[in-house]
């Protein structure tokens, strides 16, 4: 799964937002019907609603925390506000999706241009 981190290094998420890591579990992120992966850039209109996030591993006895941030607010050319927290979901059972967890926060920040989002999951 090391290849899944390469776009995070190129996009400076690893280094600016996260320390380097080895992914231990897979997840899928879907906005409407479009599945997104690390390194995808999205228009603001495509991310106005919460995505569907599925955890592909663990078991019902494993619980995860999912954090979604925007690492370069207000835009990649001048990210003077840096990282913006959009939402946190805690206590997500393995093999389920984020709707089974406890939802904490959802905010939208005004941006210029394309959107970069980081999804981080912690056991």
Image (spheres, rainbow, N blue to C red):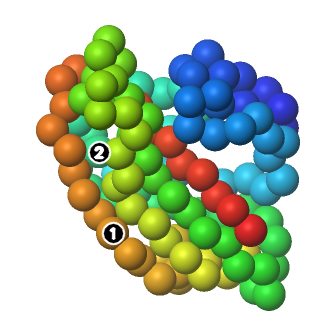
Between residue 105 and residue 55, name the one nearer to us: 105
Res. 35 in view: no
| Residue furthest to the bottom | 61
Residue visible at 49% across and 71% down in the picture: 89
Seen in the image, is 45 located left or right of residue 80?
A: left
Cα–Cα gap, marks 2 and 1: 15 Å
95 over 77 or under it: above or below: below
Side of 18 relative to 3 (left or right): left
The residue drawn where x is 47% and y is 83% is: 102
Mark 2 or 1: in front is 1
Residue 77: where, in percent of width, then height?
32, 12
Q: Residue 1 carries which label?
A: none
What residue does disc 2 label? 47
Q: What element carries label 1?
A: loop
Q: Is residue 102 left or right of residue 85?
A: right
Judged left or right of residue 11, residue 109 is left
Q: Is residue 97 above or below residue 120?
A: below
**Residue in view at x 30 percent, y 25 percent:** 80
At a point 80% along the width and 46% down the height, the residue shown is: 23
Q: Quadrant of residue 37?
A: top right
Label 1 CA crowd tier, 10 Å (few <14, some 14–19, many 20+): few
Q: How crowded is mark 2: few (under 14 residues within 10 Å), some or many (20 or more)?
A: some
Residue position marked by numbered label 1 in the rendering: 105
Q: In this view, does 49 lie above or below 89?
A: above
Position of the C terminus, as image quadrant, is bottom right
Element at label 2: helix
In which quadrant is the N terminus drawn? top right
């Amino acid at each position: 799964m090391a290849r899944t981190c390469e776009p995070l290094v190129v996009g400076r998420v690893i280094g600016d937002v996260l320390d380097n890591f080895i992914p231990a579990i897979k997840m899928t992120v879907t906005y409407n019907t479009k599945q997104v992966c690390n390194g995808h850039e999205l228009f603001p209109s495509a991310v106005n609603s919460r995505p569907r996030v599925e955890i592909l591993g663990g078991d019902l006895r494993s619980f995860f925390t999912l954090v979604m941030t925007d690492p370069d607010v207000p835009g990649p050319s001048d990210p003077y506000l840096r990282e913006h927290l959009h939402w946190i979901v805690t206590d997500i059972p393995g093999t389920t999706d984020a709707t089974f967890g406890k939802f904490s926060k959802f905010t939208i920040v005004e941006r210029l241009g394309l959107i970069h989002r980081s999804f981080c999951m912690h056991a």
